[in-house]
Image (cartoon, grey):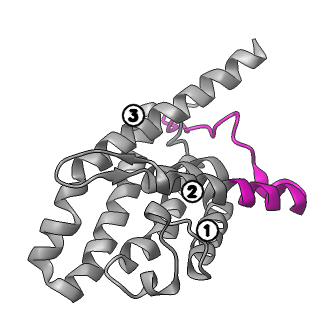
Amino acid sequence: MLDGAAPTLKPLIWQPNLHSRPLTWQFGAVVLGTLFLALSSYLEVPMVPVPVNMQTFAVSLVGALYGWRLGVITIAAWLAQAAIGMPVLSGGAAGAHHFVGPTAGYLFAFPIAGALMGWLAQRGWNGDRVGLAFVGMLLSNGVCLGLGAAWLAVIIGPQQAIVHGVTPFLVGAVLKSALGAVTLRLLVRGKMQQFE
C-alpha cells in the first residue's frame, strides 16, 4: 500500500453481480427474491408488546446480496404483487389500500432501505466486515422506522407515531440487524470454504 493511501474495502467475493448476468438470470433472481420477501412476511417472532416479522431483515438482505439496483427492482416487484392482491405482506395481507393506510410509509420505505443496504454492501459493508454489515443493516432498519413513523405521524400525530410505530420495533431492529450481519458472514465463510 502506498504511504498515505486510505485502505479500501473490497466487495464481497461471493456477491453474485447479477447486473452483469443475462436477463433470464436477473428475472430468476427477482422471482426468488420476491418469494423470499413474501415468506419473510409470514415469519413472526413473538415479542412484547407486539410481534415482529422478518420483512425488514429480508429487505436488507436482498439489498446486500443483489446490490442496490436489482435489490430495488426486486423489492418493488414484491410490493407490486401486494398492490394487485397477492397475499405477500405481513400475515398474508394484500391490496392497494395498504399503500395509503397507516402502513404506507413503511411499505414505501422498503425499496429505499434495500437500496441503502445494497449501496453500502457494494462498498464493503458486507460479510467480510461483519461490524460494518451490522451498522448497515441497522441503518436500513432505521430508514424503515423513520419513514414509516413520518407517514404515521400525519395520521395520528408525532408522539403517538413514535410510541406505536417506532418504540415497539427497536429491539427487533437490533436483533434483525445482527442476524442479517451474521447471515452475510456465514455466506462469506461458506463460499471461502468452497475455494479451499
Local packing at callout 1 (Cα closer than 10 Å; few below 14, some 14-19, many 20+) is: many
Helix, strand or loop at disc 3?
helix
Q: Which mark is residue 135?
A: none
Q: Sequence order check: which comes first, mark 2 or mark 1? A: 2
The residue range painted magenta reads 3-32
Q: Which residue is mark 1?
A: 78
x and y percentages locating residue 117 in the rendered image: 50, 54
Helix, strand or loop at disc 1?
helix
Q: Quadrant of the C terminus?
A: top right
Helix, strand or loop at disc 2?
helix
At a point 62% along the width and 82% down the height, the residue shown is 84
Q: Is residue 78 magenta?
A: no
Local packing at callout 2 (Cα closer than 10 Å; few below 14, some 14-19, many 20+) is: many
At a point 31% along the width and 49% down the height, the residue shown is 173
Q: Which mark is residue 131?
A: 3
Q: Is residue 23 magenta?
A: yes
- The amino acid sitting under disc 1 is Trp
